[in-house]
Amino acid sequence: MKILIVGGNSSVAQVLRPVLATFADVLTAGRSGCDVALDLSWPDDQFCLPQGLDCVIQLAAHFGGRDYDEMMGAEQVNVLGALKICRACTRAGVGHLVQVSSIFAGLSETSPFFGSYALSKRHAEEVARLYCDSSGLPLTILRPAQIYGEGESFRKHQPFLYSILDKAQNNEDIVLYGDNDAQRNLIHAEDVAEVIARVIQQRVLGQFACVGQTNVRYTEIAAAAIGAFDSHSDIRFVADKPNILDNAFAPDETLYRLIGYFPKISLIQGMAREAVRRKAMP
């Protein structure tokens, strides 16, 4: 089996590649440092995928924002880029496309977390389904929850979680604004990698949520970090600050039952693994 990961420099790709390498030849595509040069903002005629690919995994993404340039970038990369990847797959005779979206694609417009990233991810799903249905390209869309893992590469998209780890490591108090113990849905990158690998091996098609089976509160995250470092940090709420809002998602076992795998890395285990990595650093 031959697999191409688009977005080969992403933090998830770094975890995914060795998992896929146990059963496939794995190539990466990206703007730099990859086997194949590819930028999702390029014109369509510059998209050229290797022949003989059994599967393409689309991980590359623009994380958007609220100003014009950020909105434009999210649409160009996430939506038009996804469509160009679809067409490139059909031209190269790819057997299966796995598009890694986001659980945020399902947010309503009234959600305080809705923005150009969520909107463009939803649009990307829609154009991919439309194109793949008409062209006969087998498609899987995965909607993972907020992904965390070991290493600094995950800090960019989970800054508050990693700041909690920083505080615990340094025996500093962990301060939470407001009086709401906000909920989040987290899933470890190694669990996401295993899910993707099984989806490919079992050729599971369709759209699926890929979420943690329990939502966790910030105090639970903080407690796990404190325990991981055997820290003397305290957890404090500052009630005169605006509340941190919940962003929780319902458990969904549909995909996990299909592939015979449920996420295994608990929050406590995930925090402990990151602590071990940090403690081993010079």
Image: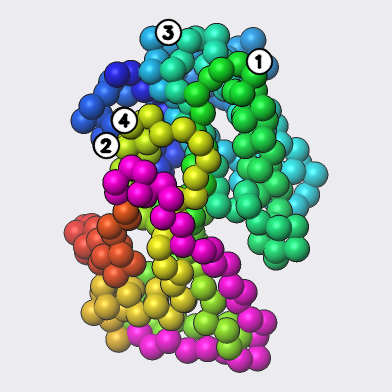
The quadrant in which residue 40 appears is top right
Q: Which one is nearer the viewer's eye here, 199 or 81?
A: 199
Query: At label 3, which amino acid type do we have?
Result: Gln
Residue 194 as seen in the image, left or right of residue 205: left
Instruction: Tell me the chief SS of the magenta region.
Output: loop
Dot 3: within a 10 Å radius of its alpha carbon, few (fewer than 14), some, or many (20 or more) residues? few
Q: Secondary structure at mark 1?
A: helix
Residue bearing mark 1: 44
Pointer 2 and pointer 1: residues touching (CB < 8 Å)? no
Pointer 3 and pointer 2: residues touching (CB < 8 Å)? no
The quadrant in which residue 76 appears is top right
Looking at marks 3 and 4 on the same chain, the residue that comes earlier in the sequence is marked by: 3
State the mark number for residue 201: 4
CA gap, disc 4 and disc 2? 12 Å
Q: Which quadrant, please, contains the C terminus?
A: bottom left
Closer to the observer: label 3 or label 4? 4
Looking at marks 3 and 2 on the same chain, the residue that comes earlier in the sequence is marked by: 2
- Say whether residue 220 is magenta: no
Q: Which quadrant, please, contains the N terminus?
A: top left
CA gap, disc 1 and disc 3? 17 Å
CA gap, disc 1 and disc 4? 29 Å
- Say whether residue 258 is magenta: yes
Dot 4: within a 10 Å radius of its alpha carbon, few (fewer than 14), some, or many (20 or more) residues? some
Which residue does the image show at 31% across and 78% down from the upper left?
226
State the mark number for residue 19: 2
Q: Which x, y percent locates residue 59? A: 49, 36
Which residue does the image show at 36% across and 22% down from the upper left?
3
Q: Which x, y percent locates residue 62? A: 61, 40
* Residue numbers of the magenta segment: 233-261
Dot 2: within a 10 Å radius of its alpha carbon, few (fewer than 14), some, or many (20 or more) residues? some
Which residue does the image show at 80% across and 44% down from the upper left?
68
Residue bearing mark 3: 51
